[in-house]
Amino acid sequence: MKLSTSTFQNTLKSQDTEEWIDLLVYRPAGYCWALFFKRMKIRPNTVTLFSILSGIASGVMFYFTDLRLNIVGMLLLIWANTYDSADGQLARMTGQYSRAGRILDGAAGEFWFISIYAGICLRLTPTWGLWIWLLAAVTGYFHGKQAAMADYLRNFHLLIVKGKSRSELDDYSVLKEQLKSLTWKNNFIEKFYLTYYTSYTKDQEDRTPELQNLRATMKEKFGDSELPSGVGEEFRLRSRPMMKYTNILSFNTRSFALFASLFAGLPWIYFVFEVTVLNILLIYMLHKYENICKRFNLRLRGND
């Protein structure tokens, strides 16, 4: 299928936030799937569900010690990530945005890795006992924090570069008020997922105090948390180099580490990689980005 370059570019969030392997593999493949799903009138949330099922199936394959079955699991995980790309591209292509869709899309990766963790733990329980489950629980906790903060910083960058139309950045105070307006009796499903998402957003904001100060200054001086183009471009130049770290904390580097550990027949190494290497990177990324926000906030306030 021949890609229309201009149309394809419109389905991307931003060149600043795209990783090379995504631009080379996942986004073109996702775009082709998005065109197919659009023609079949399949909605983005349905594509996300396909992605979740494929990701869960991949975890099942990692339970086995047979490398051939592990490779099937790797291919299923790649397929799941292709669909994960396709659902967002389809949403941008058709304008079918919704907060529920964003939450479901964000949760897709959690479903994948819960299945992957469980498959690896069941595989290693005969030799590790309950210790492997403890290691997986600790790893899963930090995995969630890494992915959440990578997503948050990426969306803040998109807010600066593209404005609200292409950013999915939310505000805890707004979500909290929306949550209060819902009742469990009349809005059970919406209140259920919004309760989780509100807590998720609060944790992101709590971990980025300098970024929140900058957002407050932006809103005070420019309104609606957006910057004039010239000021935005200056911040973009400072923020863009940090996007490579948000990408490392996302899917591709994780999958490479996971696949390498499976080829080596030592899947527990993947847990250690997440707890050590990726946590160190998370701390470094947050420290650097907070400093950028602090310096820029001082400059906007004329105190630099």
Image (cartoon, rainbow, N blue to C red):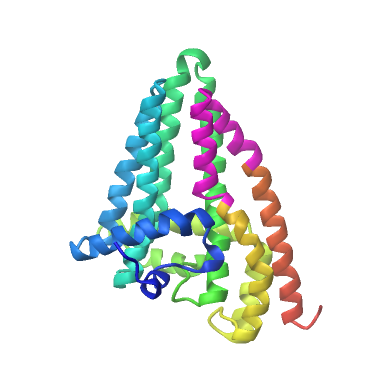
Q: Residue furthest left?
A: 40
Residue 132's place in the image compared with 294, above or below, is above
- Answer with the quarter of the image where residue 180 lies: bottom left
Decide which of 231, 78 is in the foreground and name it.
78
Q: From the viewer's perspective, tell me whether residue 35 is left or right of residue 5.
A: left
Q: The N terminus appears in which quarter of the rendering?
A: bottom left
Q: Which residue is at a point 52% across and 61% down the rendered structure image?
A: 18
Decide which of 196, 146 is in the foreground and name it.
146
Residue 93's place in the image compared with 289, above or below, is below
- Answer with the quarter of the image where residue 228 lies: bottom right
- Answer with the quarter of the image where residue 95 lies: bottom left
Q: Residue furthest front?
A: 2
Label count reads: 0
Q: Where in the figure is residue 138, as x and y percent of width and height? A: 56, 34
Q: Where in the figure is residue 244, as x and y percent of width and height? A: 61, 57
Q: Where in the figure is residue 105, as x and y percent of width and height? A: 38, 55
Residue 82's place in the image compared with 56, above or below, is below
Asked if residue 267 is among those painted magenta in the image, a careful observer would answer yes
Residue 175's place in the image compared with 254, above or below, is below
Q: What stretch is highlighted in magenta?
A: 248-277
Q: Is residue 145 visible?
A: yes
Asked if residue 290 is among those painted magenta in the image, a careful observer would answer no
